[in-house]
Amino acid sequence: MDLLMNSELFISWAIGLVIILSFLIPYIHSIKAKEAKTKIRLEKTRSKRQDKALLQHPIINQSLCIGCGICVESCPEGDVLGLINGKATIIHGSHCIGHGKCAEECPIGAIEVGLGDISQREDIPQLSSNFESNINGIYIVGELSGLALIKNAISHGIDAINHINKCISIKAKSIYDVVIVGTGPSGIASALRAQELGLNYLVIDQDTIGGTILHYPRRKLALVQHIELPLYGKLNKGEYRKEELLHIWEKIIKSQNINLQSNCKLLKINKDKDGFKIETSNGLLESNKVVLALGRRGTPRKLNIQGEELSKVMYKLIDAETYKDRKILVVGGGDSAIEAALGLAHQSGNMVTISYRKDNFFRLKARNEKNIENAISDKLLKVIFNSSPISINEKTVTLKTSDTNLEIENEFVFIFAGGELPFPLLNQIGIEFGKKIEVAV
């Protein structure tokens, strides 16, 4: 009897083990295969210098990570993270724009989203937790602070104004309590909160309203996430098209009678005992505090080549649909250039060529990278890598390539060579960059 029971027990264990192994072995095999593909992806992104994040990004505590993969699945960009050796690893860092979903979903808090070690970064200003710079009274919010996303820009602008309101207990002699520079999301949010609190404020912008959004190609989607604007209410949609957001900004400015000076460029800021003297293209302003919501784009950078002054040359694309049956050159390989080229290439009859000085595209957003690869494969447009324009004529453009000079027929040129960033201006003002400063309030 005992022998029979032992035999039955052994058979039961054996059957159980077989069942477990029949599921476990394929699972382990699939995990290994997936990890091998992830390693290949990492090698590829490293070769293209796409593995490093530009601004804020996931910071992973490897000692806490249990390799559950929830962070990988929750990333809205799809391929920023992967699992290697059972740990979450940044694979395609250049695609990260700081959604923070990975940190929200991690069950053990092994991820936070931040800027990492910025002590050697010359493009990230020193900021307190209230977004005040090393110069007391000057605040930096939005994209210029190193934190992307419209949601961040809005909340940071509000936080800065809240801190300013606490600091202004007695009105100074200055004309304004605060001058806000920039009409992007952070600038508009700052203005709304200042108006809500009854502060005497002024908003200035060297362009018209919209900030970085203004330079988006037509119908480009912008990620907003759910957030509330002072005096306006909630932005409930996860994504808005460029035109929708600009319409909202225009509606807010008109309905709230925002105190705004457009086409007013900031030239210089000097601190004095009563606050700041602000030199602009429209004259001198005086203010107790200053909020810089400038963005990182700056004014378009020119190539300084022959023919660049021709009317056929432009530095931003407002409406792709106005260009049909044209021979068009797009210069640049960043997201703005790719989005413009794709928009133009989808218009009837256009022959679009991209000239890019490097040997491949890198640090593109996931959607743009996939779309440009498809467009090239479908022969929707042409890309000439390792090339740059050296002269522009009425009917042609001459490109310098690694082998020769190439002349192509052309009717319009769009140049996306980056912007003349505001960092020289910030340096002149005295803004310091590097390690953040923490100030207790």
Image (tube, helix red, strand yellow):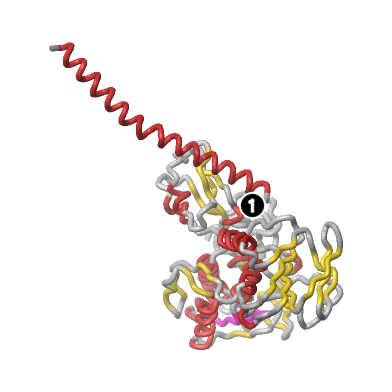
Q: According to the image, label 1 marks what residue?
A: 50
Identity of the residue drawn at 73% across and 72% down: 329
Identity of the residue drawn at 35% across and 32% down: 22
Residue 117 on image: x %, y %? 62, 49
Q: Nearer the viewer, residue 64 or 198?
A: 64
Point out the stretch of residues depicted in magenta: 200-209
Name the quarter where the N terminus is drawn: top left
Q: Nearer the viewer, residue 171 or 12?
A: 12
Q: How many labels does the image show?
A: 1
Q: Which amino acid does label 1 sit on?
A: Gln
Look at the picture and state if 3 lies above or below 177.
above
| Observer able to see residue 292 | no
Identity of the residue drawn at 64% across and 62% down: 376
Judged from this view, the residue extending furthest toward the left is 1
Residue 199 on image: x %, y %? 53, 80
Residue 321 is inside the magenta segment: no
Residue 206 is inside the magenta segment: yes
Where residue 182 sits, quadrant-wise, is bottom right
Residue 127 on image: x %, y %? 61, 60
Q: Nearer the viewer, residue 237 or 414?
A: 414
Look at the picture and state if 72 lies above or below 278.
above
Look at the picture and state if 349 lies above or below 77.
below
SS under mark 1: loop
| Observer able to see residue 310 | yes
Instruction: Decide whether the magenta segment is chiefly helix, strand or loop.
Output: loop
